[in-house]
Amino acid sequence: MTSLSPLSDQSPVIQAAYRSRAAAADLAPLPRSAKDDALLAIADALEVRTSEIVEANAEDVAKARAAGTADTVIDRLTLTPERIRAIAGDVRDVAALPDPVGEVVRGSTLPNGIDLRQVRVPLGVVGIIYEARPNVTVDAAALCLKSGNAVLLRGSASAYASNTALVRVLRDAVGGSGLPADAVQLVPGESRDSVRELMRARGMVDVLIPRGGASLIRTVVEESTVPVIETGTGNCHVYVDAQADIDMAVAILVNSKAQRPSVCNAAETLLVHRDIADAFLPRALDALGEAGVTVHGDERVLGHAGGTKAKVVEATADDWEAEYLSYDIAAAVVDSLDAAVAHIRLWTSGHTEAIVTTSQAAARRFTQLVDSTTVAVNASTRFTDGGQFGFGAEIGISTQKLHARGPMGLPELTSTKYIVTGDGHIR
């Protein structure tokens, strides 16, 4: 790089980005063993220093409660010893995964004798902008380190104490393992100015990945000059087909909605074929009511609500596009599978859609017509997850169609380069 101003003339955010570039250059050629040792050191350090992390997190949680923050958001913000142990386990799982760096994507000997190989290489410096989920701090750092990338972490101000403590633990473990500690950095500052600077650091940050609500993602996509891998909101649908097993459909619906409603792969809309509505809806509404879910139903759903345990309110147009992240679900009766698909196409965020059916023809048609990152057949929407897919801790769910789509694991954090080997060849 040339014509760069001295670091002393730059803002703290830009200085951090410079340090990340230097760390990324050191990380790129490292063997898997060096990266895995650092990851295992991180996992051990998280468990050893759990009390330090929990104490910092309690500060954030107390501020969130005082500010009247919703319980579902506080749930995502909260770190307990059990959750920290689970996070450490996720880091160990990442260490056990194959290293994508150096993998030959394709290769051949050309007719002229030149050896051509396309190999995976790190992206370089990855910036992560995310909301009140401190577990993302560790997940992102682990995946970036394993794939040879330096990471700049910009969490929300509401999790600042938690993220500061976590990054301190991560940097100590990384540095103690012989890797550059600057491979993991918290972006300086709590104001939006630091976010804007990160989004404008083109040439120093190679890619930005936003994780959070629609407003955050839209802001990063529209205002960033750094390339963005767009992660999306989760307006996920469960469609119960005319030929569904009712017991299975009820179980999948409740799991999709209520197992953990504050996450992006939780179901937000239920669609029911009219031919099964009389048999299915009373049972489904009872089950949702027992799970504490409020149903925002259309006229035909409201017609089945009498005598059930569910709290059912009339749906508005806003409900069909809502990502509730709470114990709420929109519900409608549709006249056909094609009508369900049309509804999904109109309102989906492109994350995950599920069909419950015993008909292979219906399942085949649904999977062909629905264009989301994940289409589930007779399975909960909650399976759209890097860990559940066997990728290890994911860095996000990409709802775009370029480079990465769906749960983003290690391969999605790499680019490729071509290596051309000749023997004095000239063109």
Image (tube, rainbow, N blue to C red):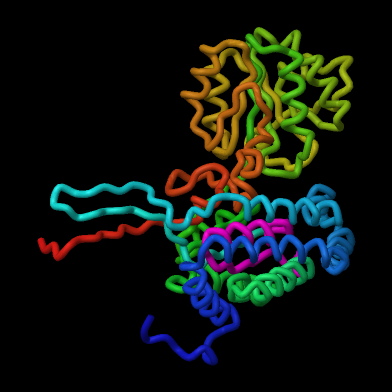
At 68% from the left and 57% from the top, the residue drawn is 136
The x and y percentages for residue 387 are: 65, 43
Is 258 left, or right, of 354 in this rendering? right
Is 306 left, or right, of 268 in this rendering? right
Can residue 219 be seen here? The reply is no
Quarter of the picture containing the N terminus is bottom left
The x and y percentages for residue 339 are: 55, 19
Quarter of the picture containing the C terminus is bottom left
Q: Quadrant of residue 286?
A: top right
382 in relation to 251, above or below: below
Q: Quadrant of residue 259?
A: top right
Residue 139 falls inside the magenta stretch = yes
The x and y percentages for residue 135 are: 72, 56
At 84% from the left and 63% from the top, the residue drawn is 50
Is 199 left, or right, of 327 in this rendering? left
22 in relation to 378, above or below: below
Residue 96 falls inside the magenta stretch = no
Q: Which residues are magenta?
A: 131-160
Residue in front for this viewpoint, 415 or 127? 415
426 in relation to 86, above or below: below
Residue in front for this viewpoint, 19 or 355? 19
At 73% from the left and 60% from the top, the residue drawn is 43
